[in-house]
Image (cartoon, rainbow, N blue to C red):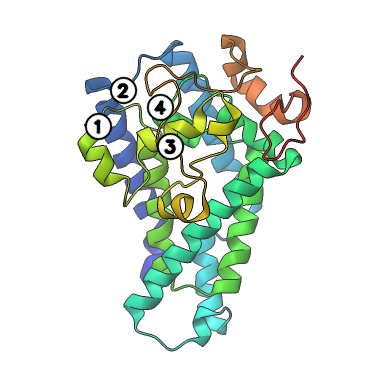
Amino acid sequence: MSWILNHEPAVRLGAFLGIFAVMALWELAGPRRRLTTAKGPRWFANLGITIVNTVVVRLLFSTAAVGMAVVAAERGWGVLNQISAPAAITIIAAVLLLDLTIYLQHVMFHAVPLLWRLHMVHHADIDFDVTTGLRFHPVEIVLSMLIKLGVVLFLGPPVVAVLIFEVLLNATAMFNHGNVRIALSLDCVLRRFVVTPDMHRVHHSVIPQETNSNFGFNLPWWDRLLGTYRAQPAAGQEGMAIGLEQYQEQRHQTLAWMLGLPFVGRTGRYPVGGGGDALS
């Protein structure tokens, strides 16, 4: 466990930089869609809010999910720490349960209008590429971290399982937001095991019924099992409009605007089951 704690930052940073570089180059070599706005200013804003989030998390939390898993293991806290099972089974179960938690959290951020206000920052991007997977409001990041720490304490997952999950989640979030072209036959196979860009892009449609589908970030099975799976957007992958109906202008893509959006923006028709304000 000490090795994992000592090397966790390097492992996560290395995985992040590696996957980001691969996806950015793939987007240049084989883009799925033509971008509707200049990449430079958009990337500056999206990567800028990522830096803000990293600083906020470092300032507010003395330990991350891996550190909390170490505490739970040392003190015997959590459901999985009370179960005697082969290590491989426990690790797989932990990764699956953590992924299900992220799926349910994602649905919650769409269903509760107050939480949707925070999550709108992610969906207000009018293009869809690797940086969209990093674009979240700092308050949402803090709430997500609190939920994750609580779930780790409750589950008591193996430390290595938490590290695997964190690396996988970060990697798949960048992969499934990639503006990359994958052969339809290959995509059909891949989306049985992982959320693909074509599958997740539907979730970023301006049409509310499509926005409220395909909530998975890593594993695609929860959407299929729980009835939130949608195979393709009505307008097709290249014809669909990305973002939110009420925010389709370039001026809505700056860092300052993203930080203020939850407090002054309109939720539109997007919260699951209604409850949003009307579009003016």
Quadrant housing residue 190? top left
Residue 195 position, x and y percent, is 38, 44
Disc 2 secondary structure class? loop
Under mark 2, the amino acid is Arg
Q: Which residue is mark 2?
A: 32
- How far apart marks 1 and 2 lie (CA) works out to 8 Å
The C terminus lies in quadrant: top right
- Dot in front, 4 or 1: 1
Disc 4 to disc 1: CB gap under 8 Å: no
- Dot in front, 4 or 2: 2
Quadrant housing residue 264? top right
Q: Which residue is mark 4?
A: 129
From the viewer's perspective, is residue 35 above or below residue 97?
A: above
Decide which of tag 3 and tag 4 comes sooner along the chain: 4
Disc 3 secondary structure class? helix
Residue 2 position, x and y percent, is 40, 72
- Residue 234 seen in this snapshot: yes
Disc 2 to disc 3: CB gap under 8 Å: no
The residue drawn where x is 66% and y is 20% is 257
Decide which of tag 1 and tag 3 comes sooner along the chain: 1
- How far apart marks 4 and 2 lie (CA) works out to 10 Å
Left or right of 37? Residue 151 is right
Residue 227 position, x and y percent, is 51, 49
The residue drawn where x is 29% and y is 21% is 31
